[in-house]
Amino acid sequence: MDKNLYKPRIIDEQIKKYLKIFGAICIEGPKWCGKTWTSNFHSKSIIMLGDPAGNFQNKKLAETSPEIVLEGESPRLIDEWQEVPRLWDAVRNKVDSGAEKGRYILTGSATPNRKGILHSGAGRIGKLRMRPMSLYESGDSSGDVSLKELSEGKFVSKMTGDVNLKKIIEFIIRGGWPGNLNTPLEIASVLPTEYLKAIIDNDASQIDGTNRNVRKMNLLLRSLARNESTTASNKTLKNDIKEIDNEDIDIDTVSSYLDVFDRLFLLDNQLPFSSNIRSSVAIKQSEKRHFSDPSLASALLKATPEKLLNDLNTLGFLFEALCERDLKIYAESMNANVYHYQDYKNREIDAVIELEDGTWIAIEIKLGANQIDEAAAKLLNINLEIENENGKTPKMLCIICGLSNAAYQREDGVYVIPITALKN
């Protein structure tokens, strides 16, 4: 690759850090999100196990003589290592044999079964999750507001410019795929559609050699799209398929297929915030469902700009997914984590960012500027209830908005940040 043409990614700094700490690192994430390009930028030699040249000779060589494919200048990139799972232990043994850091970079777009892998690699192989591009990485966010600086109390109000609703829709349909950045909107849905086909037709069976029912996998994917950004249970998905598609799927099959989708990094669910911020209220433990990129849900729903303009409810869920994808990328770069909050008193917070010091930020996500007052009132009410119960109140209250033209702090203390002005 011509490294001068490399488009920087937020994960770059984490990769540099991990290469100084671990003997090897593993960068995992969905296909086509840029793992190979980024890993190649940080490596000095490479072997690609998925290369079909010579009838997949690289893969065959790795299967017969794994020690040979590990030879090369460090850091050495081993792309799609899961094609030969035994390489994991071979890398671990190499790392154990010397004190050198940053010897190998492994990339993987699937997690193989533990069968054949003897050791977890804990302490030797550091893991990083890579996602499709955030709006800041793709150049669609000005980066006027830094999440890290905001969490440190450094904030200056500023006008950030008008945002067109059609532009937000374009970000959703196009997604954060590097190969889709310059694709005209009218054909931008082709890439995520083909991605899903590749998952169903090839990857879902190749991951463990099990043939699965393609029709049922497609039904489940469509149900997941209809339930994007919700806490729908497996039973809800099953009933949704029966009601809308007039098909019945066994609940065990739903669980099995969801596990496969997880292992292929097709899903990127949002965990519940487990911190006991309200001592007298039971917290729900359901994950919020997300695809790894909102464009996948959009493609499954066959969404067009016209359809989404006429269905603001669906657009709202997809916009929430877009924001929460970006928040995960930004937060993880500063050793923070993104959750959601939901309790049995029907109190919900769209996103909770738990910072490294244990403090947290409460975030509501709203597409329109006309929803800001309502969102602020909700955050202030939850904050007051937590305070009255002597609970752990958030460090700050924030609204991420799609159509706001300014980043500012309201008189009530709530921050308003356009997603197109945010960065890590």
Image (cartoon, rainbow, N blue to C red):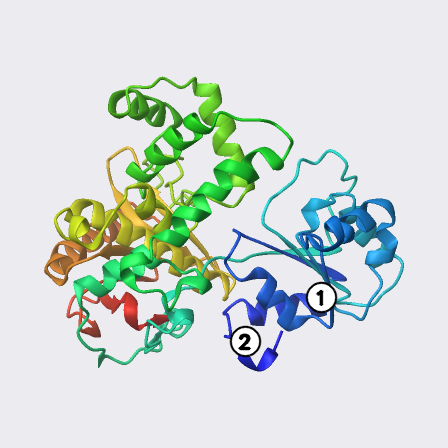
- State the residue in front, 242 or 339: 242
The numbered dot on residue 6 is 2
Position of the C terminus, as image quadrant, is bottom left
Instruction: Report crowding for label 2: few under 14, some 14 to 19, many 20 or more residues within 10 A (C-alpha).
Output: few
Residue 144, position as x, y percentages in the image: 32, 78
Q: In the rendered view, would you say 323 is above or below 6?
A: above
The numbered dot on residue 21 is 1
Say which element carries label 2.
Answer: loop
The total number of labels drawn is 2
First of labels 1, 2 by sequence position: 2
Furthest-front residue in this view: 54
Residue at 76% over, 40% down: 117
| Picture quadrant of residue 157 | bottom left
Nearer the observer, disc 1 or disc 2?
A: 2
Residue 419, position as x, y percentages in the image: 29, 66
- Which amino acid type is marked by label 2? Tyr
The numbered dot on residue 401 is none
| Picture quadrant of residue 285 | top left
Residue at 78% over, 65% down: 103
Say which element carries label 1.
Answer: helix
- State the residue in front, 260 or 423: 260
